[in-house]
Amino acid sequence: MSPPKATPLALEVTDGRKTATVMGGAGTAAVVVAPGGSGGARSWCLGAFLPSGYPASVSSDYLSYQLWDSIQGLSSYVRGMLSSQAMLAGVGVGSATATPLSAVFQFFIKDFSGMLGGILFAASQGAGLDAHAKQWRLLADVMNDIGLALELASPLLPGAFLLLACLGSLSRAITGTAGAATRMALTQHFAMQRNAADIAAKEGSQETAVTLLGMLLGMALLHFAAGTQTLLWAAFCALTVLHVWANVRAMRCLRITSLNQARLGLLLRHYLCQGDALTPDQAAAQESLVPPPLQRLLRALRLGAAGTPVVSMAPQLASLSPDLRRQLATLLQQAAAAEAGAQQRRHPGGGSKRYLAAAEEGGGRGFGCGPDAVVLLRQGAGPRDVLEAYCAACMLAWQAQMAARKRSGLLTSWPAAAQLALEDATAWLAAAPASTGYKGTAGVQTCTAGGYEAFLAALVSAGWALDRTALLQGPSRLSWGSDMHAEVGGSAAAASRISRLIMRAAADPLSISTIFKWLPFSNTVSFRVKRLRVQVASSLQCACVRKRPCGCAVAGESGSSDSRGTAPCFPPPPAAPHGMSTEMAVLFLEATTQSRDADGRPNQFDTTAMSGLRDVKATSGHVTALLDVTQKVSNRYGTLHGGCIATLVDTVGSAALISLSPKGGVSLNINVNYLSKVATGGTVRIEAQVVKVGKTIATIEVHLRDDATGVLVAQGTHVKFIAENEPTMAALIQQQLAQQQQQQQGEQQESQALMTTHRSKL
């Protein structure tokens, strides 16, 4: 009788290879190790030179890039041995006339110039190294070739040895700075499982192995050449050609899915012409590998292609040409007027954009010329706004170039559908995402490729990551329209609402106490808050004094006390109507979002967390608002921060309670359930509803949804305690008015002293 056949119970797989099998049968079990499963030379090499978990832990282009990078590195290290021998010969090694001090001095000057050049290069181009990693990586290797060639040639010209050595050191320093910075960016691209440190360590091991091999080959070449300059230079030139070719192949095989200015311009132009989006593989084969500074130089010399325009993102206005300044000033005026008109029609979001774009004909076409187009970014502009702004600027620049060619009688390379899109870029950008085309100013379908939203959808389908954009932009941000009021002392809406409350305070002085309760807490009007509060206090005092039963008089309309300094008296406060409370709820949120210190910076945590809050609406016990998810409220993963969500549950929930009663209460418990995420650049809709209000306890529910999809992002519950023994509102008003009266008297005395001093000088 044959023994029972064993069957596999489990398989062990390590890095994609079967390394062991657990067999069982007839009541026994055993582990069978596969050949080579316990390790060996191959496993050791894979673990020493490849990241853990390869190939699943890295991107698909990792291995091909590393192979080409090793080839170019090998050629660099072989040539490095040749240049090192030349440098030693140049400083006099082996010569009886050379001294150690002179050699040290020459090396000092060479290294000093290289270090200084590296600092200057990082200061001038450091911001663009991440955005154009492929281009700067290739330039770094080309600069390395130039530096090695200068060092190799330095002994041939003894009179210019130090100059050539310094220039070579400068080139090598630029190589080191740009190479190290771009290596970090590429490492982040390869890391698919947040294993950037492991990838960097294994790349260091690969580089060390290639360095050792290059040094051995270099020593062999030096021994074989035996000082023959012709043979050395022939080998150097051949290795340089191999080095450049391997670098180009390495850059072409990189399939980076993030969007920089060059890739986005290439994708937009192809979409307008062909109606579809390039994949990362196709874009890598067509993308220019020339860094932006060299592209601008070639365009100025009229040696470069006019494909992607030069767009300046968020520059300082002083750096622009007078023509562009006039265009942008006109656009700002139109944007402010459109926003004011939308607010009058009770459409707060209508007519307002987070950017302005303008193009200048002939920009970037000669020495001293500016960019082809300029984008001004508004305060609070997010990544999606920057993305749309760059597309708008490219279309305006192409439109200007196309119009210039038509005036010159030249033919344009744009297809008919793309020409129509460029002629009406505003309609193309505003096209609905579900449409197959868009309606121009004439109201007819003018492009079968769809509009901007369809372009974004095509990019996502092609494999591009829209949440990872690297569009190089300046630090300048502009405020216009309603933002101007916030910058100089508070929003116009808040000031108007305060004025309406003051006018109604004569009949209801109790309601105005809520304004005084929150304005000192939130410091809502930056450096002018004291003056505004004095005006509010004076107007309220005047309104209340007119109702005094004792008949006390007030001099003038300022609301100040009479000449005898009689303290103001107040009638018994009536109950606050609910209509006033809803306005107070909106005012409370506006005060929270606009709080600034004397330097114009947010001075509270709530202000920073709610900086993008807008479109606040309140009814009795119910408040809704929108929040733009910007970088300020995002976490390191590019989504809305959980702390910001908790703050919204707290603050918007409190506003909902204020819409029912002037007593805001204090928080007892806040519970938040995080259900989904919203990426940076999106919008969240917040809805707070008072569920129950008792004598001392109030419960509010707050829901946060993705405004674009309606998906529930978070659900929160806010429980607040309402104290019964709070100070009376009349006492709060009297105390606040007394403080404001003292402050106003101090300001008046200071003003009189200044006027007296000025008159005495005259």
Image: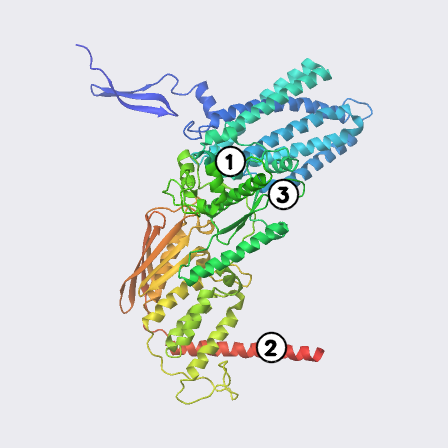
Amino acid beneath label 2: Glu
555 shown above or below 717: below
Asked whether the viewer can see residue 257, the reply is: no
Instruction: Specify the quadrant of the image occupied by residue 735.
Output: bottom left
Q: Which residue, as the protein is rendered here, is positioned at the far left? A: 1
Q: Which residue, as the protein is rendered here, is positioned at the far top? A: 1
* Marker disc for residue 750: 2
Q: Single out the mark in the foreground, 2 or 1.
A: 1
Amino acid beneath label 1: Trp
* Element carrying mark 1: loop
Screen quadrant of the N terminus: top left
On the image, the x and y values in percent for residue 591 come to 44, 64
Q: Single out the mark in the foreground, 3 or 1.
A: 1
Asked whether the viewer can see residue 280, the reply is: yes
CA neighbours of label 2 inside 10 A, class few (<14), some (14 to 19), many (20+): few
Amino acid beneath label 3: Ala
**Nearer to the camera, 711 or 207:** 711
On the image, the x and y values in percent for residue 595 come to 48, 62
Cα separation between marks 3 and 1: 39 Å
Cα separation between marks 2 and 1: 69 Å
Count the numbered circles shown.
3
**Nearer to the camera, 527 or 272:** 272
* Marker disc for residue 123: 3
On the image, the x and y values in percent for residue 238 come to 64, 19
Q: Which residue is mark 1?
A: 414
